[in-house]
Amino acid sequence: MRSKHPPARAAEAGNSTTRQGAASPGVQFLTVPADLAGQRIDNFLQSRLKGVPRSRIYRILRKGEVRVNKGRVKAEYKLQPGDVVRVPPIRTAEQAPAPVAGDQLRQLVEASILYDANGLLVINKPAGLAVHGGSGVRLGLIEVLRQMFPESQFLELVHRLDRDTSGAIMVARKRAVLTHVQGDLRAGRLEKSYLALAVGKWPRGRRLVEAPLRKNTLKSGERMVSVDPEGKPSETRFQVLERFRGATLLAAEPVTGRTHQIRVHAQFVGCPLAGDSKYATDEANRAFREVGLKRLFLHSSVVGCSLPGGQEVRVEAPLSEELESVLAELRSGTGVPLQP
């Protein structure tokens, strides 16, 4: 279909939002202004195609219906100033009203706010809450926050956590904060530390795991990651904090930021994380349920960064009562009846 708006006459992105509930006017060409540079294309589309399910946005990206400067891009592509984004027509029938967060969920998220200043939010994300909607999840942390703070003109995830992982996650309230902190993240200057409970005895002296990781999608649609020579370079630093019978408490610092990195690197060493339904054995998970563990024991315990104004921020996220009680049970001498 020939566009009514060729790239030379592209509208500014901030003035070209598709109106929710109305039929699409056809192909749109949106020029990215400087203040939106660095934003992922999927988030850019989500904020402009109000009511369109995130799964639909991923689908039009995969099929190449969205183009940037006439070329196909992946969902993680970060926009540059002056990029021209081609957005295909989105039929009204494919739009759906955004789900509304219930009072209980809002109260849970509000109680989980650890830091809110200088254009940055840090949330102690509960396990089981996705960071954003999509792939069968209708409502995630970022959608809840946008409903809690409707007056905020800008709210974007600085980084991500797996749905099953709890702990500190940063959300930017200002574009300048997002760009600055993500720059530190890419440069390896962001502090990120996790607490992880591994199955068995972690090998003495094993402080670094360097193993390339490759993502795979099973026929069922489940996403798995494995160590593969053709995968992306990946590095995690581990430190033993405490040893128990049948388990080891670790501090883990991902140098790179690959999907499921800590989980797969722990499995690679021979000590998968306790409660991990993807990478630990059913036998191990049954044994840890005996000491009260009903979820993945992986927690983002510390995040630290600098802000555009020069402030240094370091936030610690406490463990949930559930994980604390598991550690208390292990410290009592009960241990886990597993062979290393």
Image (tube, rainbow, N blue to C red):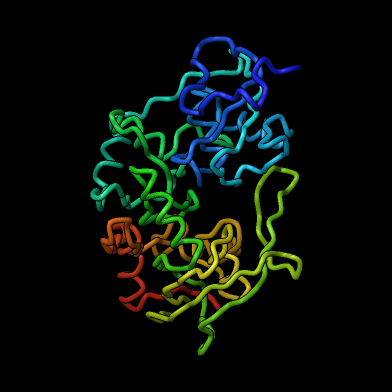
Q: Is residue 94 left or right of residue 322?
A: right
> Residue 150, position in %: x, y?
31, 28
> Viewer-proximal residue, 165 or 212?
212
> Viewer-proximal residue, 34 or 303?
34
Q: Is residue 63 left or right of residue 223?
A: right
Determine the residue located farthest toward the bottom in the rendered image.
205
Any part of residue 76 in sight: yes
Determine the residue located farthest toward the top in the rendered image.
22
Q: Residue at x 45, y 44 (%)?
A: 131
164 shown above or below 272: above
> Viewer-proximal residue, 114 or 158?
158
Based on the displayed image, in which of its 4 quarters is residue 266 positioned? bottom right
185 shown above or below 95: below
> Residue 251, position in %: x, y?
41, 74
Q: Residue at x 60, y 57 (%)?
A: 278
> Residue 66, position in %: x, y?
67, 31
Any part of residue 289 in sight: no
Count numbered badges in the picture: 0
Instruction: Quadrant for the N terminus, please.
Output: top right
> Residue 92, position in %: x, y?
58, 13
Determine the residue located farthest toward the front in the rendered image.
8
Instruction: Quadrant for the C terminus, please.
Output: bottom right
Q: Residue at x 34, y 64 (%)?
A: 304
Based on the displayed image, in which of its 4 quarters is residue 281 positioned? bottom right
Based on the displayed image, in which of its 4 quarters is residue 294 positioned? bottom left
